Amino acid sequence: MQSPTLIQTLEALVREACASERNLFGYGIWTHHIVTVVHHGRRLAEHLGADPEIVEIAALLHDYAGIKDPHASKEHHIQGAVEAGDLLRRLGYPEDKILAVANCIMSHRGSVELERTSREAVCLASTDAMAHIEQVPSLLYLTFVRLGMGIDEGTTWVSEKLERSWRKLCPEAKVLMREQYAAARLLLARNATGYEGQNTGLTMALD
Ligand SMILES: [Fe+2]
Ligand SMILES: [Fe+2]
């Protein structure tokens, strides 16, 4: 039997971590986030002239630290870069490519101001954001089901996450995602106070 490729080995490791009870995000982070980031990574790497192998490995590992350890969530870009380095070194990956992958993971977050110094890093940050914009139901699941937020709090959380994601996109990715972002914004647009207290036909009918 042929031995698994590096990508297959990493896929199996990350998928297993996603299926673990310790993963606070639920298995959907594999099916509706990591897989989507990998998919868009392959596509966008071509557009940007980035190295597709570095982008794919970084896409697989970019949230791995936060998935494995719920306490690492806030620093998962830093811990993730270190752990990806250790893991890839054990698997015999070349040192210069390890640095390129770690650099992508370190700067992938929208909420952390870190300069993206390579095409691959720009590509990963954009594809991470593309996945958020495309997979709004998984963000809603995270806020309402996993984090237990109420309607307004959860809607605000998702809206702000999407705004950060949009800002994180490179110009090429903005062209690809413009319509989907507009649709997501429309879905989440709301009147913060709702219609409570207004003289609507509904309240009158209930009198
Ligand atoms: Fe992340
Ligand atoms: Fe991510």
Image: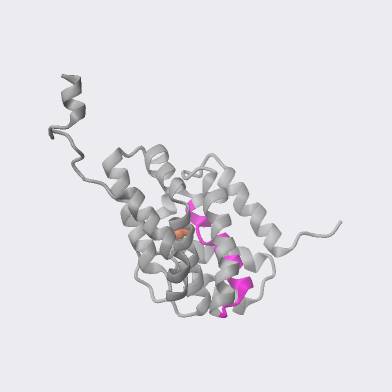
Q: Is residue 94 visible?
A: yes
Image: 93 above or below 184:
below
Residue 200 percent across, percent down from the top left? 17, 32
Question: Which quadrant holds residue 60?
Answer: bottom right
Q: Position of residue 5 (x, y in %)?
A: 74, 63
- Outermost residue toward the right in this view: 1
According to the image, what is the colour scheme of the structure?
Answer: one colour
Q: In this view, does 181 lie above or below 117?
A: above
Would you say 97 lies left or right of 122 here?
A: right
The answer to which of 201 and 64 lies nearer the viewer is: 201
Q: Position of residue 7 (x, y in %)?
A: 68, 62
Left or right, 11 with respect to 29, comes to right
Q: Position of residue 57 (x, y in %)?
A: 60, 66
Residue 50, magenta (yes or no): yes
Q: Is residue 160 toward the left or the right of residue 146 in the image?
A: left
The quadrant of the image that shows the N terminus is bottom right
Who's the residue at 59% across and 61% down the image? 39
| Most common secondary structure along the magenta stretch | helix
Give, as a single range, the part of the protein colored magenta.
49-66
Q: Going 32% across and 39% down the picture, which residue do you hit?
A: 149
The answer to whether residue 36 is above or below residue 190 is: below
Name which residue lies at 46% across and 47% down.
138
Position of 24 with respect to 185 (left or right) is right
